[in-house]
Amino acid sequence: MRASALFLTLAYAASMVMARPTIRSEPVEAVSKNTEDILPTFSQCINPGVFALTFDDGPDKYSWGLAESLHDQGIKATFFINGLNSVNVLEDSVTTEAGEKTYLDVIKQYYDQGHEIASHTYQHKNLVGLTVEEIEYQMNTQSDIIYKAIGKRVKLMRPPEGVTDKVSQKVLKDLGYTNVLWDIDTLDWEKKGLAFEQKNVKAVLDKDIANQTMGHISLEHDIHEDTVKTLVPWLTNYVKQKGLTFVTVSECLGVDAYEGGSDNSTITLDDTTGTATIDLSGLN
Ligand SMILES: [Zn+2]
């Protein structure tokens, strides 16, 4: 039952992969002609009119306040997090507006506020050239940390620097992950200032054709104070001005965010017939 449903999901995802360019990643088509072997990879949403705000490399000291502020504005974001990068999620704590919190609390707070949680590996190691065991360690350790915080296993991931090779694509696919890249790169990590970041966003968003251009996935890093305090307020405003609706990545792609079903899943599995129904109506 589950296998046929999974196949339909993957075949569907594979058709999306063929239709869209990936960014800084080997062409997925080159890995295998067999759709069941292809790591589902996306750099844009599958429908127009939506915008997925994503943050990499956290959590860090600004993350709690950022999640809270977005929530207060009715904006859902997706956080691609590490366990041991800017902070040690299992050991460190942070002073927030709501008092002293552990970073597991911060991750739980994302979840409780309707944001989505995804993996960016445990230690932010570039996966290219790593062995199967090393990649499994990076993914499984991070999965355990997120499970400890929210009691769910994530299915969405983004490789550090957006790069994978054939080995990592196969391991990630076997572990059940969907590879989420981006089509708007703010390049906030270069710290060249708001004007530079605005130019990078506008270069893509201003070319949109209403009701035709597929929704966007933007890349930011919430470990930078300027990103949280300057870029995000401008960007969220600009996206609203364009009339786009903020969605989580699972909504943007119509896939599960978590094992056992995403809170936002548009895929319905029918165990009696072994079929999967993909409902895209809510994204139109
Ligand atoms: Zn990163």
Image: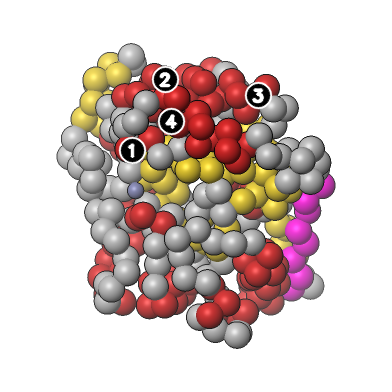
Q: Is residue 85 left or right of residue 54?
A: left
Which region shows up in magenta?
274-283
Cα separation, mark 2 vs mark 3, equals 16 Å
> Do the CB atoms of the residues marked 1 and 2 lie less than 8 Å apart?
no
Residue matched to label 2:
230
Which residue is depicted at the point 50% across and 28% down?
198
Q: Is residue 216 above or below residue 231?
A: below
**Local crowd size for mark 4, using a 10 Å CA cut-off: few (<14), some (14–19), many (≥20):** some
Cα separation, mark 1 vs mark 2, equals 13 Å
> Do the CB atoms of the residues marked 2 and 4 lie less than 8 Å apart?
no
Position of the C terminus, as image quadrant, is top right
Type of residue at label 2? Thr
Dot 2 or dot 4, earlier in sequence = 4
The disc label shown at residue 242, or none? none
Dot 3 or dot 1, earlier in sequence = 1
Q: Is residue 63 above or below residue 15?
A: above
Cα separation, mark 3 vs mark 1, equals 24 Å
Residue matched to label 4:
196
Residue 260 showing in the rendered view:
no
Was residue 172 drawn as part of the magenta stretch in this picture?
A: no
Q: Secondary structure at mark 3?
A: helix
Cα separation, mark 4 vs mark 3, equals 20 Å
Q: Is residue 67 left or right of residue 32?
A: left
The disc label shown at residue 189, or none? 1
Residue matched to label 3:
240
Q: Is residue 179 left or right of residue 65?
A: right
Number of numbered discs overlaid on the protein picture: 4
Residue 199 position, x and y percent, is 51, 32
